Image (tube, grey):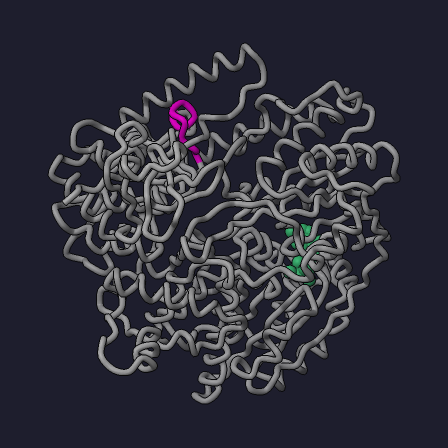
Amino acid sequence: PVDRSPEIQEARLKLPVLAEEQVIMEAVRENPCVVICGETGSGKTTQVPQFLYEAGYASGIIGITEPRRVAAVSMSHRVAKEMNLSTRVVSYQIRYEGNVTDETKIKFMTDGVLLKEIQKDFLLQRYSVIIIDEAHERSVYTDILIGLLSRIVPLRNKKGMPMKLLVMSATLRVEDFTDNQKLFRTPPPVIKVDARQFPVTIHFNKRTPLEDYTGEAFHKTCKIHRMLPPGGILVFLTGQAEVHSLCRRLRKAFPFRKDEEADTSEAMRKFKKAKQKKTSLPRIDLDNYSALPVDEGDEDREAGIGDEDDEGSDLDIGDDPEEKADPSIPLYVLPLYSLLAPEQQAKVFRPSPPGTRLCVVATNVAETSLTIPGIKYVVDCGRVKKRFYDRVTGVSSFKVTWTSQASANQRAGRAGRTEPGHCYRLYSSAVFGDFSLFSEAEITRRPVEDLVLQMKDLNIDKVVNFPFPTPPSAEALVAAEQLLVSLGALKEPPRTGRVKEMEQARLSCPITPLGRAMASFPVAPRYAKMLALGKQQDCLPYVISVVAAMTVREIFVDLDRPAGSEDESSKLTQRRARLTQMRRLWAGQGASLLLGDLMVMLGAVGACEFAGCTPKFCEENGLRYKAMVEIRRLRGQLTNAVNAVCPEVGAFVDPKMAPPTEHQVVCLRQIVLAGLGDHLARRVQAEDILDPKWKNGYKTPLMDDPVFIHPTSALFKTLPEFVVYQEIMETTKMYMRGVSAVEAE
Ligand code: ADP
Ligand code: MG
């Protein structure tokens, strides 16, 4: 029996999913797998686990997977509160942290965490139910999990340890799961939850701003706030930097009582202080960790400009009358995006201060994962930021593109949860008509070597035959197997036999012992290979630090942040000079120079750790504090993972790590080459420079056009003949990132 407070009980009764409790529980009783569709906000995530708990399914753990860390954490807290249970019972586990105990009955986790658990126990014996939430997002891990569970559930039933699978989606587009014979021979029943959605009036713009949609969003929000009746405003933008910039402009335009603001910032300062004190070296319980290179929250991952700091200069303020501060109508402006600290995220659920209107400026986390109460107006820029990979060359780029019609409608729906609402689309209806109907499944848009390795480790040799809801392309699978063979993670296929057999063999290479070790490291296969080789010459601590630094995005702040005014620009020049000097220092001298950008990373990690990894040190030295904290956690985690595979090396995290010796640098370069061997580039020879644009360019095997060393790279001036790179990122040019020199033979 669950003892809920009267307020909670009252709020629950208003949720549409409650009306379907009996239908859902009956379907669950009679079927091993059930699909539930219901609008965002209808109560799926918070209520369905409670139904299962009350219906007696908590003999084992009720597990719920979320594609985003934000949702896993906040939903676990919410459900604990609703059920009046401790977080020892309703808990969460995300990449580095969690509060799971022996008493845990309801466990929210990211999908990557559950995938790791399947590797340890294929039958997931501790669980009685698995709920795959947000299945419409079609994240890679969600798709794989559904494929795996379609096999695990019948196996469990056969063994007399029944288990249930629930798949929950915010859209009705579930045919990829239900009409897929390979996945479920008997199609699972689909239960539709009729959300009491109030009508939302859609307003299209006459024209579509091609550039300054943030400016357009600002004007629209100002207008709504000045002219329209009370009700929260939710603005959708594409990334963290945009979110912060708009928040600043809105706060300037509609400031609310200074003393209140001072209060919160004072509280924040205290909180930050308390947090700093707490950070010591991480203690990670190996049985309880899980991490995969989850590319979650892409929208936050591009150049962490303006991270966390809401102050800063307002570059985008013009003479617009709208920008004149008007304190008579205060607006309570809150940012929301995946990497925002949880205590900041939680603010959107609390009532806004009396006399203010709530305005949340969000990336697409607010599209389906979180429901913000009281939203009446939605302002939608119609765009989304995504990472794109070129399938042939592996070149990646972040691009802001139009979203899909389905997403745009989801966004609009956020306005009609509590009363009729309005959605202002900052684009024309003609442009909307050209949007694709749905977003593509992520698995079709990215390389899959990490997944293939994980699956081989689960003894799924013929990955092509795996019941993917949407299979990755055959090319992507072949490329993945080839890379893994070249890294030694898979056995090379026999070269004899007929063409057809060889084709088959190329797609079903079994895993090697090295591959198993690599699969146990929570990083992509190229980096896992480096870790596996790290034992030589006592290089392990360095390899771990370099790998940790390479897998965390954007550890350096952007030196090219534009300056606002003359006076600022001279300060900026000074700062830039200082940071450049630091980076030169970290690059070391003599032999270590050849390790290039990786040496700079290693130097930065070493120096930062030596200084105690403080926000102050990071700020002064152009490092992103959040990135450095993540690197520190990852170092601890990778050290544990290496020790688990190879206890005799006894690796440990040394906060006072000395720089590598010359000999070790040579060794490190070999290790890096072993991991990045397929990312080799050779300087374009003088006689081959047909076009002046090719000057200082590098040639890679797969691309016709040259690639370049970025001006901020440690090797920009050296231009070694051969280099390996971490990745190629297309911005203004094709640039290699993470470059290190290779000895010519
Ligand atoms: P769904 O999963 O169907 O999108 P949820 O179960 O997430 O729906 O949300 C149901 C309701 O619970 C929403 O109206 C939402 O506003 C409310 N809710 C969710 N989390 C919180 C929270 N932390 N605080 C207050 N209300 C919340
Ligand atoms: Mg939900």
Task: Specify whether 653 is left or right of 630.
Answer: left
Rendering quarter of residue 353: top right
Report the image quarter containing ligand 2: bottom right
Magenta span covers which residues? 617-625
Query: Where is 638 relative to 108, above or below?
Result: above
Q: Could you tell me if residue 257 is visible in this image? A: yes
Rendering quarter of residue 328: top right
Q: Where is residue 704 shown, x and y percent of the image?
A: 39, 48
What residue is rendered at 23% in x and 75% in y? Answer: 495
Between 467 and 228, the residue placed more toward the observer is 467
Q: Where is residue 262 shown, x and y percent of the image?
A: 64, 24
Between 448 and 677, the residue placed more toward the observer is 677
Q: Where, quadrant-wise, is the C terminus in this rendering?
A: top left
Task: Specify whether 138 is left or right of 6.
Answer: left
Query: Where is 109 relative to 501, above or below?
Result: above
Kindly give the residue lying farthest to the top in the view shown. Answer: 567
